[in-house]
Image: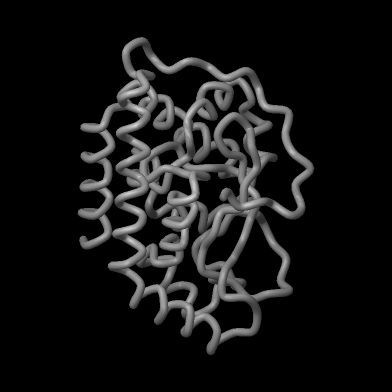
């Protein structure tokens, strides 16, 4: 069962755009989904000790829920709740993007974000079908609306945990750190560059591409 967002009224999705000829075959979609289910189940089992330690660290070091939930726009414009370990203090307001040095981020949160452990709960999003292991990263609705024409194609597939943009912009927080308006910098500079990489993924979609991106992501994490 997919997660149900609690505070998003829905989104008027643009018409879906077909994937390139020969790459939307039922066989590819079935194989990709099978890989998602198998890998997410195996991943949740293997990293369960890390999940437990991270959850305990979040719980003991700052008040508030262990998990951060945020409504994102998924495949065909369907909203869903993305899951992360909470890395910020509750009750503080600020931009919807996180620049480096953001005062809202807790000490434990910095470690979780730097190691990407905060993203591990998204394996559950993959298991229930909200996301895929590999695909364009899901955005909040206001950023999707800024690039509606581009997202007509991007939202034809499930969003993912990793893709070209997730690897190339792994240090996104550092890029935004010196900006007086992080949201504007993200919308005007970072997101357009990421959108180009999302389209590159859609052009390259295959199981070979997915496996290569997973390996590339793992290599980036251990560097």
**19 above or below 88?**
above
Q: Position of residue 214 (x, y in %)?
A: 26, 46
Q: Position of residue 164 (x, y in %)?
A: 34, 38
Q: Residue at x 41, y 79 (%)?
A: 52
Q: How is the image coloured?
A: one colour
Between 4 and 17, the one nearer to me in the picture: 4
Q: Residue at x 52, y 56 (%)?
A: 178
Q: Quadrant of residue 188?
A: top right
In the picture provided, is 59 more to the left or to the right than 141? left
How many discs mark residues in the rendered view? Answer: 0
Between 92 and 158, the one nearer to me in the picture: 158
Q: Quadrant of residue 184?
A: top right
In the picture provided, is 115 more to the left or to the right than 77? left
Between 162 and 188, the one nearer to me in the picture: 162
Q: Quadrant of residue 66?
A: bottom right
Q: Position of residue 121 (x, y in %)?
A: 46, 62
**115 above or below 27?**
below
Q: Residue at x 62, y 76 (%)?
A: 65
**26 above or below 109?**
above
Which residue is most to the bottom? 60
Q: Quadrant of the C terminus?
A: bottom left
Which residue is most to the front? 1
In the picture provided, is 198 more to the left or to the right than 38? right
**142 above or below 124?**
above
Between 6 and 112, the one nearer to me in the picture: 6
Q: Residue at x 38, y 19 (%)?
A: 24
């Amino acid at each position: 069962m997919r997660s149900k967002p609690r505070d998003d009224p829905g989104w008027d999705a643009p018409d879906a755009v077909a994937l390139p000829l020969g790459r939307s075959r039922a066989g590819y979609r079935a194989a990709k989904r099978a890989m998602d289910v198998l890998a997410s189940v195996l991943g949740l089992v293997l990293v369960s000790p890390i999940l437990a330690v991270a959850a305990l660290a979040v719980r003991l070091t700052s008040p508030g829920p262990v998990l951060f939930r945020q409504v994102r726009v998924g495949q065909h414009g369907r909203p869903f709740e993305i899951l992360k370990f909470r890395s910020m203090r509750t009750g503080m307001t600020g931009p919807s993007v996180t620049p480096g040095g953001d005062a809202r981020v807790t000490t434990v949160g910095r470690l979780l974000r730097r190691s990407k452990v905060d993203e591990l709960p998204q394996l559950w999003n993959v298991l229930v079908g909200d996301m895929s292991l590999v695909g364009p990263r899901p955005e909040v609705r206001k950023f999707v609306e800024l690039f509606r024409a581009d997202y007509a194609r991007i939202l034809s597939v499930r969003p993912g945990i990793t893709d070209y943009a997730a690897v190339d912009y792994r240090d996104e927080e550092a890029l935004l750190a010196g900006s007086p308006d992080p949201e504007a910098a993200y919308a005007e500079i970072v997101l357009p560059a990421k959108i180009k990489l999302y389209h590159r993924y859609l052009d390259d979609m295959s199981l070979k591409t997915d496996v290569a991106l997973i390996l590339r992501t793992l290599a980036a994490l251990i560097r």
